[in-house]
Amino acid sequence: MAQAQSAFDLDHLTATQAASDICAGKYTSVALVTAALTRAKARPELNAFITLDEAGAMEAARAYDAARARGEPCKPLGGVPIAIKDNIEVAGLPATAGTPALKGYIPGEDAPIVAKLRAAGAIIIGKTNMHELAFGVSGYNTAFKTGTEFGVRNAYDTAKIAGGSSSGNATAVAARIIPATIGTDTGGSVRIPCALNGCASLRPTVGRYPQAGIAPISHTRDTAGVMAGSIADVVLLDRIISGQPGIEAADLKGIRFGDTAAAIAAAHEKLKAAGVTLVDVDMPDLMELNGQVGFPVALYEAYDDMVAYLKRGAKISIEELVRGIASPDVKGTYEGLVIPRKLPGPDDTVVDAKPAYEAAIKTARPALQQLYRDTFANNRLDAIVFPTVPKVAVASNPDSSDLANFVMYIQNTDPGSNAGIPGLQIPIALGATSALPVGMELDGPAGSDGRLLSIGLALEELFGRIPPPAKL
């Protein structure tokens, strides 16, 4: 086994390369899955996993190796270990959505997105930790931990947050436990943690991926998303899930990006040197329209969508769910807003959510979508480029989940989420003073996922992958 494991380097291995190597017989799935599980168990302080399925993963790895020995064809993710966010259903494993009331819920079937990955040969080693019920951006979950402290921890500095809500996914990829994962994104939940942990992620156009079998917040805003150590792996998983054809790297000469911030100056210089045209764009109504959509849609739909999900699967009421919530920020949101169908009003008051929700769906969201369409068309843009988050990871503690941090971290990712357009997070560097990952996002027109990924492949060649975290 030691000889087989020496054939790969988890610090630099991609899912694409691993599938190719296993297919070529350079090492076995058993060897690679064993190494991934060993590394996962060696990093309990990260709190990256809620469930590790060692027995199931090893059984699946042995079965894949046996199939290859019989001469069966290779698969796109054949024998490669991945993990799934714990609000996505995996047959035979708990689907807790990061909350105690669901720790006994064990679905009998895979969510469709999981079934697609299994059919492609992926080996699921476990379910990842997350901000409770996906309602937050810090990953500071007080319900589940494997280390001595609460909160999913940043792979580059365990005193810092991992981001959320797909927290464990990003940390597991950044810590080089696995090369790729599947998360979910409502307002930034695959992009924010990848920005803070130095991984790549795609929030697809809403509707590109199947959404059944996933604990919801908002059917208007929710989507599964791919998170990986490389854009090439994001492309591979997107192709498996979406069924779209393969994607090649774009020629950056002639690409036009709308630039909405003066930050990431060094990245901009690299882009311009590679032939990218940066165009200053003005979207003066963006934040006002986004404010009319974001909370009204998410908080109003959270009630009905969760009730329907619980009725289908766990067979508990939403009130039972809320009684079990461990994290104070999430409990307060459900008890004060979601359950009574309210929204924050002026001077610490609350107001009925229904009128604002109806206005959001009928007027504000269509206007927001039109603003994006006009901006892309009038400026002939391939994408809008901006810092994924305005700040690197902050300290991991209960205060990291406060409203100020929530608003700060989602301010750049939330508008595209509300418009339903695709967003691609790309790691570009480690901060010169913080030594923490810095991310850049590209948002494209609705349905332009393939074009975004093509550009992302070219940008990965331009920027390279950031180095792995320093060894303990």
Image (cartoon, rainbow, N blue to C red):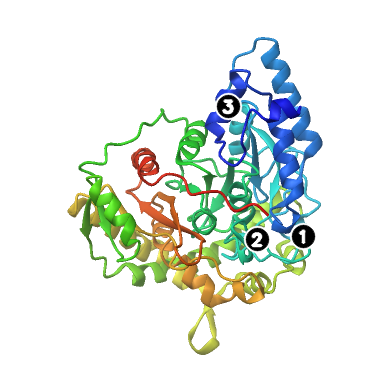
Q: Is residue 204 left or right of residue 374?
A: right
In the rendered structure, are the residues bearing label 1 and label 3 in contact, judged by CB atoms less than 8 Å apart?
no
Q: The disc labelled 2 sits on which kind of residue?
A: Arg
Does the residue at mark 2 contact the one at mark 1 (Cβ under 8 Å)?
A: yes
For label 2, the residue is 153
Q: Position of residue 99 (x, y in %)?
A: 73, 60
Which residue is at a point 61% across and 36% down the rendered structure image?
A: 9
- The image quadrant of residue 440 is bottom left
Q: Position of residue 21 (x, y in %)?
A: 58, 24
Q: Secondary structure at mark 3?
A: helix
407 sits to left or right of 315: left
Query: Residue 35's spot in the image, x, y percent?
Result: 71, 36
Q: Residue flagged by tag 1: what amino acid is it?
A: Gly
Q: Which residue is mark 3?
A: 19
Instruction: Please tell me how crowded label 2 is: few (under 14), some (14-19), or many (20+) other residues with Cα within 10 Å.
Output: many
Q: Residue at x 22, y 45 (%)?
A: 275
Label 1, label 3: how far apart the Cα atoms are: 31 Å
